[in-house]
Amino acid sequence: MRTPSPFLLIFATLSFLKVAVSEEGICSTPYSLINSDSGSKPLYWKVTNPTLSPANLQDLPGFTRSVYKADHALITPESHVFSPLPEWTNTLGAYLITPAMGSNFVMYLAKMQENSRSGLPPVDVERFIFVVQGAVTLTDASGVSHELIIDSYAYLPPRFQHSLKCYASATLVVFERRYASLDNCVTEQIISSTEKQPLLETPGEVFELRKLLPTSLPYDFNIHIMDFQPGEFLNVKEFHYNQHGLLLLEGQGIYRLGDSWYPIQAGDVIWMAPFVPQWYAALGKTRSRYLLYKDVNRNPL
């Protein structure tokens, strides 16, 4: 008897899921094993309060879902290692994606504690911050301040003098990369939030897409917010020259990377090298939302 292909198994799972979602009571999966974000909890609560699934593996010595391969990595919360961030005060950081993997960017979590303050990146490095817990105050060299709360973000150009201060506690996801400059192209500081960005057309797809940065030539990367309802999946099987760094903010699902298929949930991070096959399907009972780094607007040469 032939062994069913991974695609057929995933297709069967999705078909069952759609029945389960449309006919309440059909799905018999224990609710405790499904991402059950309560409306009483803050947005992105699961990112900073992760759980292992299934629950009986939570305290299994030596267990981790993290995987590192030549063209991709899955970095899960139980394997995060926090230590003081260089140049920051009262802040612990966990580097999740770095050039040591083969990436052209850095992605890390910054846990700011009471009366904490950020440092500056190297002079030629641009920075993007996204708040997943708490609030911070961003102040530029002229003394102008902005409060950033959950779901707010800021893009800070290279050589841009700024500081982030936190008076209670906050968790940020931070992307940094060396700016690939072009003649007569200059980027500007951007401060906004996901809800302020319009939904964009996604021909042939069902997911909802927002882009947090301008698509104009000066910007050498973008950050996408992508939303999937339970049972929805990517129609395209992506295979391209761009790199990705992904943080699952909400929900759970299955991610294909190369020839591997990974169950993922809120709090998981993925690095995707150029030309690794990639595909996602949303499972569970709640929306999947992920934040996605993508390099753009530059010749690969």
Image (spheres, rainbow, N blue to C red):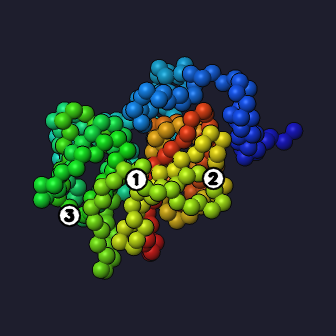
Residue type for callout 2: Val
Give the mark toward the camera: 2 or 3: 2
**Residue type for callout 3:** Arg
To which residue does mark 2 refer? Answer: 206
- Mark 1 crowd level (few <14, some 14–19, many ≥20, 10 Å Cα): few
Which residue in the rendered view is the most extreme toward the right? 1
Q: Residue at x 16, y 55 (%)?
A: 144
In this rendering, does residue 66 appear at all? Answer: no
Say what secondary structure mark 1 lies in. helix
Question: Mark 2 or mark 3: which comes first in sequence?
Answer: 3
Q: Which residue was labeled with disc 3?
A: 159
Image location (x, y in percent) of residue 191: 30, 55
2 or 1: tag closer to the N-terminus: 1
In this view, the mark in front (2 or 1) = 1
Q: CA distance from mark 2 to mark 3?
A: 39 Å
Please give the residue where the numbered disc 1 appears in the rendered image.
196
Given residues 152 and 95, the one toward you in this image is: 152
